[in-house]
Image (cartoon, rainbow, N blue to C red):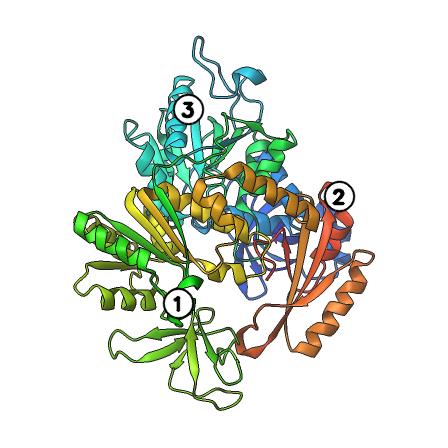
Amino acid sequence: MNIITVIPLSRAKVTEELSYFTSAEVPVGAIVAVPLRSKSIHAVVTKAEKAEDLKSYIKSAPFQIRKLGRVKAAAFFPAEFVAAARELAETYATTLGAVIDSVIADVLLDNASKIQAPLPRQASLIVGGDAPAAGRAKHGSAGSERIFAVQGDDADRMSSWRSLIRQEFARKRSLAIYVPTIEDCINIFSELEKGIEGFIFALHSGLGKKKTIETWAKIADTDHPIVVVATGAFSLLPRGDIDTVILERENGRGWMGQKSPYLDMRHAIESIARSRRQTVFLADSYLRTETLARVDAEEVDRGSPFKWRSISDARDSLIDMKAYKAVENRFKVVSPELERLIAANREDSTHLFMLTLRRGHSTLTVCDDCETVVLCHSCSSPVVLHTSPESGKNFFMCHKCGERRSAEENCAVCGGWRLTPLGIGIERTEEEIRARFPGIELFKIDADATKTDKQVHEALQRFRDRPGSILLGTELALLHLTEKVDHVAVVSIDSLFALPDYRMQEKIMYMLVRLRSQAARSILVQTRKPEEKVFEYGLKGNLSDFYRQTIADRKQFGYPPFTTLVKITIEGRKESIANQMAEIQAKLAPNEIDIFPAFTSTLKGKSVIHGLMKVESHAWPDPDLAGKLRALPPGVSVRINPESLL
């Protein structure tokens, strides 16, 4: 009989290690199924000992040692990966099991006994006469980990990766390219596959179990060097010849985990790659402020000369919408300039993409009598006004919890009937365009009109096939829009300025840079806040001045990269969570916590309260503080350097 010590692979707050008994000989590193409470979960074996050597421990154990479930695979995780995962667990104040569960796709754990295990990295072999990969000639022999930053236009970066692939293939080495979303995975795979068909593979959660296992097997069995384009859940691959890891769209959305332990997958993949002594490239058209600061501090080298000004032939226009309200005394959705662009687009048989950030008709509804915002009955978030395409009737919908109800109601506070819709949603924009341009060919992409990837691609194709047409879309459309469009227009972006988020200016800048790169002839932006400097920087492609302003603001207010932010969140009854947060303050002393309510309430009307700590970057991770954070009750959420402070 053997006593097995395991690490449970669970994002829930559980004991770091558990013990079970089994008659089987189980190797360290094996994936096993273990009973935990009423469920069976995955776990990794960290220790295996003979029961007869542990008799005194078994007798004195304060718990009953349960029987081990079935063994799913022999040693699965390379030692260097486990070491990197331990460091990540300390950084994110969580358990080793939670980290591993976050960075390894469930389909791999579920089928661990049927697939090739991830391989330890092989030592690099320099082929005589072959050119080294970009950046390596200056820094010694291949195989020593280096971090490089690449900032340039999409086309230039893709060209660089094609050259790098050729160099690595000549050295008999493979590459991995990681991206934040499925759409990015599909798009970059398509960009790079020409000429290396059969030696490039894509891995993402949209493939399904069968296709994922088949692709994994091909990656493992292909004798020739390969390229893998993948999302973060495939941070380990069944190849030992990968010398280079590229993080593409490094400033894009989708890298942050949405469930505990809320890992930043960019950081996780980089840490794993460095533990495996792989060279890492961080790449985008405009890199994150944190990454650029690392370049300034010489922690990261430039992989190529930076582009600090995004070059575009598109004519740019910034339209002040306040001027039209002053003249016409009404809220205007489409400016005369945009109307002229729509007319010219139809007359010239070109193509026009119009971005509207939000679904629905109006993003906010306010009582004219008492100025109360209409809220969701379940979670107290502001509701969005929609119009039913079937009945033509208006209804309120909460984009947080999904609640729907009729819009035929009076103010819940004063009983007034003058409820005024404000803000610009995609439905309202469509109504205005169709009223002004009857018969216009208009295609729409948002989460309501195009619920599947197939519907999105069909809408895009119809748009491409109809010169003179308009594509109206939310950010969902921007994710899928890979080819240039003659004209780009932003109907409204102002709602983002209302969000108290220190990253918001950077998000807006990144969006403007991406939109500008998509425009072949012109880009037009409507706003009621033309004084915001981000419009000047974004529409002129002035990345350097925007970065200088942003890094100065971050330093002044003590935000990353100058500090590490720790956000603690509790939800429940207002009085109860206030008391609980006070107890947490006492436990974490002498660290100071700023306490503030959430921007909105949560489901069923519960309150949400946040606590924010700022720790000097050089002082994190702090083992003592991390241990205290790990020991907080299961209902307390802890996020390290969260994407938002709301």
Measured Cα–Cα span from mark 3 to mark 1: 57 Å
Contact? badges 3 and 1 (CB < 8 Å): no
Residue named by callout 1 = 327
Q: Residues within 10 Å of mark 2 (few under 14, many from 20)?
A: few
Query: Which residue matches tag 2?
Result: 619
Q: Which residue occupies the foreground of this view, 393 or 479?
A: 393
Q: Decide: is 503 above or below 332.
A: above
Q: Position of residue 87 (x, y in %)?
A: 65, 41
The alpha-carbon separation of the residues under discs 3 and 2 comes to: 37 Å
The kind of residue tagged 3 is Leu
Residue appearing at x 63%, y 44% in the figure: 88
Read off the residue under disc 3. Answer: 164
Nearer to us of marks 3 and 1 is 1
Residue under the image location 41 percent in, 44 percent down: 514
Q: Amino acid at mark 1?
A: Val
Percent coordinates x, y for residue 79 in the rendering: 59, 35
The image quarter containing residue 631 is bottom right
| 3 or 2: tag closer to the N-terminus | 3
Q: Residue furthest front?
A: 327
The amino acid pointed to by label 2 is Ala
Q: Position of residue 458 (x, y in %)?
A: 22, 54
Residue 597 visible in rendering = yes
Q: Earlier in the sequence, mark 1 or mark 2?
A: 1
Q: Give the position of the C terminus as an image quadrant.
A: bottom right
